[in-house]
């Protein structure tokens, strides 16, 4: 069970039932549970789609696409069944928010899935939870069972005449499966290799049927929009960035934790006020603003608004809400190496630029960090990374390249300080050197 | 091949959830592994038969997923995260500590078969780093002392 934290600047929407026992269906009902889905059953599907569109809700998995817009791409008539797929394969390094939603408020995800179903004319939804989150899968299995027992799922839900089935599904360890087309492959019982698009999942998805794929936090936001209205939700954040976000603060911070803050909250304030600043009076060096695939920001670049558009303007991304704070004692070459080691491990091997690129980059960065670097390696690391961008079926290649390019560009001096066989200047700050596991 | 009644009930139920049999494969493999300890040839063959797949098709899926293993492991699989958030908070030192304490390396198993050790990628414990999973249990905000107490606790079980 993960500890909960709070801060006065928080605006609790998705997290409002955290710590209130809402895994219990009776308690969930007391806390306005299943009211939104009943409201949705009395609405025209298009009206639901427009409401979500107008709320400015954007995909919380990282891509930030307007959710209502995504729903509107599902064809009204389809010879094949339509599906809703909740992406709970949370595994972007730095991200631990969906975990809290499943742990404290699983019914809100179920409700979001059903509402997405009503809005798009679908009659079945799947909630995919990563394999490591077994205790959360068990919480979800019970929540689904309880909802069926009350007649909230299955045939004729709430006596409306509308049928909707919700099923759980568990993964078995794979970052790549968090990518939507790989997620569908995994659910179909295959290796999680991405599909080429078009056709997009909204047209050809699970078992060939039109499929809406949304992140768990996105779906958990939907019932609140139904009840609170599009205008209320939109006004929580800046223009076109409605609502709040669960920000996962981690790394070198005095008060790490998952905080729900309005979209557009200032990053500097988030680090120094909400997160309590950096321990031991140390200085900030860098921030990973939204999970390990985002370009890093330097200490001078953090006076920014944390919303999708402002972060794009700042040369990075809002991503998945994983804010990793890095202090001055950290070696950025080693940081780049650890990120690359991850992507090399997770590359499914389907696209050559990603499979070979991540492997070469890991090897080069390992050699470089251990004193075997030459000057031309620095440009080579950047060149190799830039050549992965946009050349793969799925964004894993981009995810590996983007942080690496930003580290080489913004911390070039640290690379130069490793040249000529010099030992890593930060080695004293690491208790041990671990060459054997890094190779 | 005999699985528990609970496994069989869940398997039968899951088959009704999807339009294709194959779709139950990934969660079924993990549940089978939980019961048998690893995915042996017998388990692979049994599941392949049930789902009208070849053994090779099942093995092909197994090799993709990091939690699935065809080798026996210790009773308690200690999975230490060293990804960025945990690395910044001492995850690597914690892994080294475990290696010394257990006398095994990455993916090794102690001779008594009680523990195995694995360096894993992000497990979603970033805000409570460093984080470790022992089988499915999360342990967070760890230090080497807490780790020692925890491992001793498992050993007594």
Image (spheres, rainbow, N blue to C red):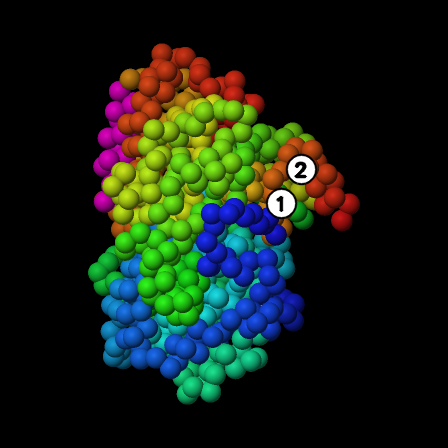
Q: In the picture shown, does residue B74 fall above or below B86? A: below
Residue found at x 31% / y 52%: A238
Left or right of A238: which side holds A272? right
Residue found at x 52% / y 18%: A428
Front residue (pair A7, A433): A7
- Label the magenta part by its dominant secondary structure: helix
Front residue (pair A64, A187): A64
Q: Position of residue B31 (x, y in %)?
A: 57, 61
Residue position marked by numbered label 1 in the rendering: B139
CB atoms of marks 2 and 1 within 8 Å: yes
Q: In the picture shown, does residue B52 fall above or below A101? A: below
Q: In the picture shown, does residue A106 fall above or below B82? A: below
> CA separation, marks 2 and 1?
9 Å
- Placement of the C terminus of chain A among the 4 image quadrants: top left
Residue position marked by numbered label 2 in the rendering: B147
| Residue at the right extreme of this rendering | B156
Quarter assignment of residue B42: bottom right
Magenta stretch bounds = A376-390
């Amino acid at each position: 069970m993960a500890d909960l934290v709070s801060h006065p600047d928080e605006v609790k929407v998705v997290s409002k039932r955290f710590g209130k026992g809402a895994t219990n269906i009776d308690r969930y009902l007391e806390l306005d549970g299943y009211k939104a889905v009943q409201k949705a059953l009395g609405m025209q599907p298009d009206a639901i789609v427009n409401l979500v569109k107008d709320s400015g809700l954007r995909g919380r998995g990282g891509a930030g696409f307007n959710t209502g817009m995504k729903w509107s791409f599902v064809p009204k008539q389809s010879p094949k069944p339509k599906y809703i797929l909740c992406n709970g394969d949370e595994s972007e390094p730095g991200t631990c928010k969906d975990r809290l939603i499943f742990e404290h408020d699983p019914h809100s995800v179920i409700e979001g899935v059903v509402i997405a179903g009503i809005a798009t004319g679908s009659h079945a939804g799947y909630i995919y939870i990563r394999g490591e989150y077994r205790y959360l899968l068990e919480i979800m299995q019970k929540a689904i069972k309880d909802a069926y027992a009350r007649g909230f799922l299955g045939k004729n839900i709430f006596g409306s005449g509308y049928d909707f089935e919700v099923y759980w599904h568990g993964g078995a360890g794979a970052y790549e499966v968090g990518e939507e087309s790989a997620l569908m492959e995994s659910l179909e019982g295959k290796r999680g290799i991405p599909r080429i698009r078009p056709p997009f999942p909204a047209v050809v998805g699970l078992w060939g049927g039109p499929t809406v794929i949304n992140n768990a936090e996105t779906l958990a936001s939907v019932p609140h929009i139904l009840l609170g209205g599009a205008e209320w939700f939109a006004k929580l954040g800046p223009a076109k960035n409605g609502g709040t976000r669960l920000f996962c603060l981690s790394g070198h911070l005095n008060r790490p934790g998952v905080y729900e803050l309005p979209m557009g909250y200032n990053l500097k304030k988030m680090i120094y006020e909400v997160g309590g600043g950096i321990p031991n009076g140390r200085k900030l060096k860098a921030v990973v603003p939204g999970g390990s695939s985002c370009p890093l920001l330097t200490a001078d670049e953090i006076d920014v608004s944390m919303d999708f558009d402002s972060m794009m303007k700042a040369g990075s991304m809002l991503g998945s809400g994983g804010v990793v704070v890095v202090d001055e004692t950290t070696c950025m070459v080693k940081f780049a190496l650890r990120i690359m080691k991850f992507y090399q491990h997770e590359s499914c091997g389907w696209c050559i630029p990603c499979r070979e690129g991540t492997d070469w980059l890991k090897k080069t960065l390992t050699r470089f960090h251990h004193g075997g670097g030459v000057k031309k390696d620095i440009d080579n690391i950047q060149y190799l990374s830039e050549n992965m961008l946009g050349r793969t079926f799925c964004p894993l290649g981009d995810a590996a390249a983007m942080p690496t390019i930003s580290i080489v560009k913004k911390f070039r001096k640290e690379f130069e300080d490793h040249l000529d066989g010099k030992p890593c200047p930060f080695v004293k700050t690491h208790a041990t050197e671990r060459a054997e596991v890094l190779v | 091949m005999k699985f528990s009644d609970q496994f069989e009930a869940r398997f039968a139920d899951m088959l009704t959830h999807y339009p294709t049999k194959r779709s139950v494969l990934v969660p079924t493999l993990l549940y089978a592994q939980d019961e048998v300890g690893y995915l042996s040839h017998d388990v692979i063959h049994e599941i392949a038969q049930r789902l009208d797949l070849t053994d090779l098709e099942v093995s092909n899926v197994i090799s993709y997923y990091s939690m699935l293993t065809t080798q026996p492991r210790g009773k308690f699989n200690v999975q230490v995260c060293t990804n960025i958030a945990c690395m910044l908070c001492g995850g690597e030192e914690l892994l080294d500590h475990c290696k010394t304490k257990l006398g095994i390396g990455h993916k090794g198993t102690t001779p008594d078969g009680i523990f195995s050790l694995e360096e894993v990628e992000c497990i979603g414990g970033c805000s409570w780093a460093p984080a470790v999973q022992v089988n499915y249990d999360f342990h967070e905000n760890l230090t080497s002392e807490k780790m020692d107490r925890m491992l001793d606790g498992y050993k007594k079980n």
